[in-house]
Image (cartoon, rainbow, N blue to C red):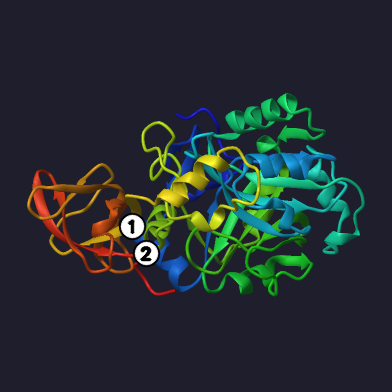
Amino acid sequence: MADRLPPLYDVHEERGAKFTGFGGWEMPVEFDSISEEHAAVREAVGIFDVSHMSEIEVAGPDATTLMNRLTTNDVGALAPGDAQYAAITTEEGIMVDDVIVYRLPDGIEAGTAADALADMDDDLDAGAGDPAYLFVPNAGHNEETHDRWVDYRDEHDLAADVIDTTADWAMVAVQGPDAADALDDAVTNGDVSGLPSFDATVAAVDGVASWVARTGYTGEDGFELLCPVGDAETVWSAFDDAQPCGLGARDTLRMEMGFLLSGQDFDPDEEPRTPYEAGIGFAVDLDTAFVGRDALARAKSAGITETFIGVKLLERGVPRGGYAVTDGDLTRVGHLTSGTMSPSLNEPIGLGYLHESYAADGTEVSVVVRGDEKRAEVVTPPFIDR
């Protein structure tokens, strides 16, 4: 068994979930079936326990400077309630992780956000004081990310508190075309249905003050809710009509959209990639002085030779991470990092890195499956219309 259990573990076990280890956590991989859960999110609404994700809070006079030095996007552009996607990179421009950054109301002290929300309403500009941020690294990355922030802060004598609050927060994701209706039914104080994409606010979910963001990892409309860990069951139970979903459906949903999975589609040791190779150059602001900025400026100027792209098999077989992609005549032109049978399309799809000259839509390639070259074509994700 993995080292850590999510706060809703007993609830999931009673519901009959099957579990798997992921990022040091024992998480539900499936409740009913991956295909049923996947379809619920595409057609109606599903709910995921994503409490395995990490949470770091940063606050103080130099909090914005610290965040801007260690993430690739421009945190200075965020107002309270704004969210932003960014990468964390090495000096060489290699991605260590990708994160969502939330600007909290000013004046919140690092390490206190879960409690401070209870005293707020949805007027996020009402606070006064130093800037405060909550950002969400991937599962199992909390300690290394916290240490990276603290080490940089101390080396550069910046005035900011950095607290790993992963143990303080539970996190659930409500995703699907009916997600807004589900939130309206569950929220007892606050207005979330009109929240723009990548905005966040404070709202009471069945009486529990929660940080509610219109973000997600499925390609559907949806919300991610952070609440105090002790209130996780109350928030989860507020969505009784939503299909419980595990990590299996989360994976097939994100693959259909072409979303990156940290540690699989990029990894600083096993799959070292820049944001430009990984297809997230939109999350890089070269006007900010972040770690890796100069290397990425050079990389952008030089151009890339491989890019993150999708493929669809035209023959029977299931593509998997690590499979070679060839030109159909045994010459390797790339490799896959993820693959599955798409539940929406009932077709085998994969994601990975191909040489730029083979990365145009419709290009014929082959995927080597168990030693056989299977005919495939290149598809720029998403694989489905959204």
186 in relation to 92, above or below = below
Task: Measuring from the top left, give residue 285's x and y in whole percent.
Answer: 60, 53
Instruction: Decide which of 356, 224 is in the foreground and name it.
Output: 356
**Residue pictured at 82% horizontal, 64% vertical:** 122
Which quadrant is home to the C terminus? bottom left
337 in relation to 173, above or below = above
Instruction: Decide which of 80, 49 is in the foreground and name it.
Output: 80
**Residue pictured at 69% horizontal, 42% vertical:** 67
Amino acid type at circle 1 is Ile
Task: Measuring from the top left, give residue 297's x and y in whole percent.
Answer: 52, 47
Which quadrant is home to the N terminus? top left
Q: How far is disc 1 from disc 2 in space, using C-alphas?
A: 7 Å
241 in relation to 73, above or below = below
Label pair 1/2, CB-CB below 8 angstroms? yes
Callout 2: few (<14), some (14-19), or many (20+) C-alpha neighbours within 10 Å? some
Amino acid type at circle 2 is Pro
> 46 left or right of 379?
right
Task: Measuring from the top left, give residue 41's x and y in whole percent.
Answer: 47, 66
> 230 left or right of 376?
right
Dot 2: element: loop
Q: Mark yes or no: residue 247 visible.
A: no
Task: Measuring from the top left, give residue 301's x and y in whole percent.
Answer: 45, 51
In the rendered image, which residue does mark 1 sit on? Answer: 309
| Precedes in sequence: disc 1 or disc 2 | 1
In the rendered image, which residue does mark 2 sit on? Answer: 381
